[in-house]
Image: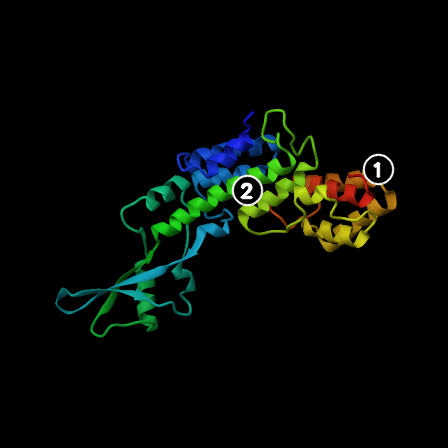
Amino acid sequence: MTTLLDEIIDGSSDESVRTTDLLRKVQVAATRIGAPGVVEWVKRELQGYSDEDDLPDYRRMITSVTGHFTGPMQSQIKKALPPYPGFEKDFQVEMRQPLITLQSFADAAEDPQLQWPAWRVEEYEKSGAFAIQFFGLFGAWNVITRQSLHGVIDTVRSKAMEFALELQMSFPDAGTVDGPSVATNTAVAPVVFNTTNNIYGHGANIATGSDIAQKSIIKGNIQEFERQVKALGLGDADAAEFATIVKDDQSLEKPRAKAFLEKVRAGAIAVGSAVPSDVIAGSLIELGKMFLGLS
């Protein structure tokens, strides 16, 4: 029987499947397994990123800039402008538009352009970075190649495929109505953690679901246990406290461990990651099980 994960994996390499439709399937699967970070990513890809939203690395790019010079007798010259100290950000663009808008730009007849504001054109001209005798810089714009836009869209499709493959490797039924989720199986949490970080291109990288199945922490290795806890984003003191609690109590079911995990879920313990606190707590449980030799 074909699962939702199968549909995502197959659709990611099928050009007849629209990227927006592919992402909606990812949203359904992510909602069912309890991966709010992935759900939020899909919504932002479909609706666009606000100025306050964390922008994935693949939606930032360095571009060439073309300058429009005017001179005697209404003559005009268009020349590529060289980068210059103080103008580094002007040669970069952040693509916060909805994915469907980027697709329309990619399918256009010509490469889209992003005009510089007039005051910035004036400042560049005054910098002396580039000049043509008897000509003045009238305008400038970033040139965003259609090829680079297709690259962004392809990256989104690849991340959708990686999300499904990562889950399918350890949890083939993930994404089904009654399939495993973060709420019902803590072993799902590390996979969700990894896929969320992979999408945004930053953050800590702990063992993947397959690594966890291979018991990447040797039973009783307190140093490695504490290191992996830190890799989840906990501070040194909090990581040391959790490691000590589990080591001393030899359990994740006693009051101290349960109280610590509840603090993580409630956000009372700071975690340097955009990954949801429930997912972090689930990952802590799985690491604790490995340390205690319970998984």
Q: Name the residue that disc number 1 marks.
A: 254
Image quadrant where one finds the N terminus: top right
Q: From where the camera sits, is residue 131 visible?
A: yes
Instruction: Say what secondary structure mark 2 lies in.
Output: helix
In the image, residue 74 lies at what x, y percent?
14, 64
Which one is in front, 186 or 141?
186
What residue is drawn where x is 21% and y is 70%?
A: 135
**3D distance between C-alphas at marks 1 and 2:** 37 Å
Checking the image for residue 13, the label placed there is: none
How many callouts does the rendering have?
2
Image quadrant where one finds the C terminus: top right
Residue 265 location, quadrant? top right
Crowding at label 2, few (<14), some or many (≥20) Cα neighbours within 10 Å?
A: some
Horizontal relation, residue 55 to residue 63: left or right: right
In the image, residue 269 lies at what x, y percent?
71, 46
Instruction: Name the mark nearer the viewer: 1 or 2.
Output: 2
Residue ranking furthest to the front: 1
Q: Name the residue that disc number 2 marks.
A: 162
What residue is drawn where x is 39% and y is 34%?
A: 16
Residue 249 location, quadrant? top right
In the image, residue 194 lies at what x, y percent?
62, 45
Horizontal relation, residue 141 to residue 225: left or right: left
Instruction: Say what secondary structure mark 1 lies in.
Output: loop
Crowding at label 1, few (<14), some or many (≥20) Cα neighbours within 10 Å?
A: few
Specify which label sits upstream in the sequence, 1 or 2.
2
